[in-house]
Amino acid sequence: MHIPHLFAQLAFLPSFQVKIKDKSFSELLSESEISTLALACLTETYEPGHAIVREGEPGDIFYMIDSGSVDVFIKAKGSSPVVTLQSGKFFGELALLSSDKRTASCIAKSKVKCHILMRNDFNLLLGDLQSLLDGNDYKRREAHRAAQPKKAVKLVPK
């Protein structure tokens, strides 16, 4: 990976005030964990009219809008968008918790660039989000790691 691209990739995440169930990523994660998440994100571009997510489909991707705008539609509320999301906003955050069905459709209103995070990547890097929401914050995780006995590694010559 090209180094300037790496720094550009890391720079986007702090600008997103991501909240899940009234807790922000900055409350749940250390700076190094946030940087790790930024490295795990992919970037996708969508053309106007593209259905990024569809209501009723299972979800496993969280989207953060870098540029462009996304219309959000809920079938039960009619054919007009209930909201239009712009750069710096996000959607699909509940996909980090479970693969429940999407509660809305998100359609690119303009050309849209999103940073995306897969639930599996989040879980591999940081564990289950629900345990973070339940109070297992990074300070507690770091204290737990520090308290674990260090395992000696025995080297065996060949």
Image (tube, rainbow, N blue to C red):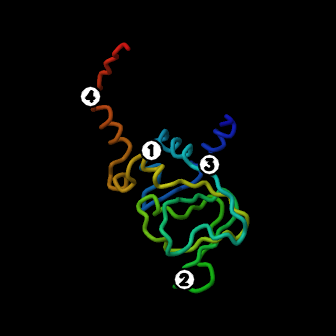
Mark 1, secondary structure of its residue: helix
**Residue 19, image x and y in percent?**
48, 59
Question: Residue 149: which disc?
Answer: 4
Circle nearer the N terminus (3, 4): 3
Q: Which residue appears farthest toward the top when viewing the image?
A: 157
Circle 3 crowding by C-alpha within 10 Å: few under 14, some 14–19, many from 20: some
Distance between mark 3 and mark 2 Cα atoms = 32 Å
Question: Residue 125: which disc?
Answer: 1
Q: Given this view, does label 3 or label 2 mark the residue nearer the observer?
A: 2
- Inspect the image, locate mark 3, and give the three-letter code of the amino acid beneath it: Phe
**Residue 51, image x and y in percent?**
63, 70
Mark 2, secondary structure of its residue: helix
Question: Residue 75: which disc?
Answer: 2
**Mark 2 touching mark 4, by CB under 8 A?**
no
Figure disc tally: 4
Circle 1 crowding by C-alpha within 10 Å: few under 14, some 14–19, many from 20: few
- Inspect the image, locate mark 1, and give the three-letter code of the amino acid beneath it: Leu
- Inspect the image, locate mark 2, and give the three-letter code of the amino acid beneath it: Lys
Q: Is residue 30 above or below residue 51?
A: above
**In front of the other: 133 or 40:** 40
Mark 4, secondary structure of its residue: loop
